Image: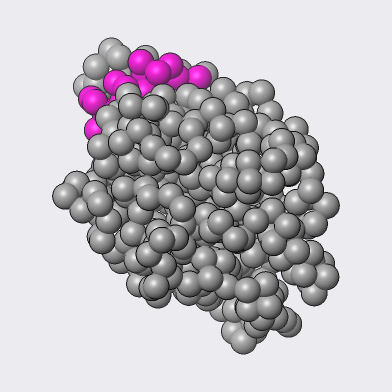
Amino acid sequence: MITTTDISPELKAIADKVSAGHRISDEDCLYLFEHASLGFVGSLANAIKERLHGDKVFFNRNFHIEPTNVCVFSCNFCSYSRLYAKREDGWELSIDQMLHMVKQYDGKPITEVHIVGGVHPKMDLQFFADLLKAIKAHRPDLHIKAFTAVEYDYMFRKAKVSVEEGLKFLIEAGLDSIPGGGAEIFHPEIREKICADKVDADGWLLIHETAHKLGLPSNATMLYGHIEKFEHRIDHMRWLRELQDRTKGFNTFIPLKFRNKDNDMSNVPETSVVEDMKMYAIARIYLDNFPHLKAYWPMLGRQNAQLTLSFGVDDIDGTIDDTTKIYSMAGSEEQNPAMSTTELVNLIKQVKRVPVERDTVYNEIKNYSGTVNEPNPALN
């Protein structure tokens, strides 16, 4: 796996644990952040990734719907939302407008629609249930991955229903899985400073745990690279690892890099590419019970996302088709995030990995190991 000569006894002990398939501790994790080289953690993470998935790298054909960027909350790191009281430059889509977006993909082999947005006081539980029903009535086979825990917390409280009641109502309407957004950093010391007014860690975790118990898979995220310390990142991942031990309901973990354009934390410098790669690698090492680690390419940029494939990542999301503004508005390298299937396949093959198209829950649809070009570019 890795040459353990000329490294500290602590690093050798961690490498031995990983080689044996044993779980590393919080103390081990902190030592990796503080003392391990990028090459060291990259080698460990890559070995874990190959043990789990070989040379496969997953992607899917998806698009986003963002119902609104008008929001009742004011997170300091957010460049996307517009406060409800000052919403002149925001957007608010109707169900008909969103269904029209879905219809634009008729006849194309898209497998997933990802629906997230701001928390709008007039877009309530019934509104979103009606949206899900309309999408399913038009295209029953389309997987709907929708709404962050922040959105759920608000709509359930406003509707005066429990988390379980609210999720069951939306499942009946057509909800298939839950994205991982809104987690940010769980530790209250940091959460109070960057997003004090939205659902706390206990609320986020309860929503995902309840979803898992109801058979809804979900993802998990962490916003890193701002005012948090290594200890806060580890605390965050520990809560996720413990919940995954109980439910096994998380599909993937997605570290999200803080971007500092046009928000209230613009004075905070962004992390370097080296730190980004180290974050991915250590996440792969620590979250031993998560089957997948995703690099969200519209946030990192396609070249850096490609680089993560050497640091434990086995998934780079999907085609997107320029349907998300969340990271482009925050200064991401990808101002018009869209990649065709051919481009995704080639991106993965350039680093000697095997591209595999998946559905939302990682059932394999097509292995592109022997494919040079997409047979029908019109369906990309």
Left or right placement of residue 367 versus residue 21 in this view: right
3 lies above or below 124: above
Q: What is the x, y in percent for residue 173?
A: 80, 57
Which quadrant would the C terminus be assigned to in this image? Answer: bottom right
Q: Nearer the viewer, residue 27 or 357?
A: 27
Position above or below: 278 against 317: above
Q: Is residue 285 above or below residue 330?
A: above
Q: How is the image coloured?
A: one colour
* Residue at (60% x, 26% y) in the render: 243
Task: Give the magenta range.
Answer: 23-39
Camera-side residue of 52 and 379: 379
Looking at the picture, tell me which residue is in the foreground, 197 or 379. 197
Q: Percent x, y for residue 99?
A: 69, 75
Residue drawn where x is 83% and y is 70% of the image: 137
Rendered residue at 28%/42% (across/down): 225
Residue farthest toward the front in the current orientation of the protein = 85
Q: Position of residue 128 (x, y in %)?
A: 69, 59
**Is residue 165 in the magenta section?**
no
Decide if residue 84 is in sight here.
yes
Q: Residue at the spot x=62%, y=31% of the render?
A: 206
Quadrant location of the N terminus in the rendered image: top left
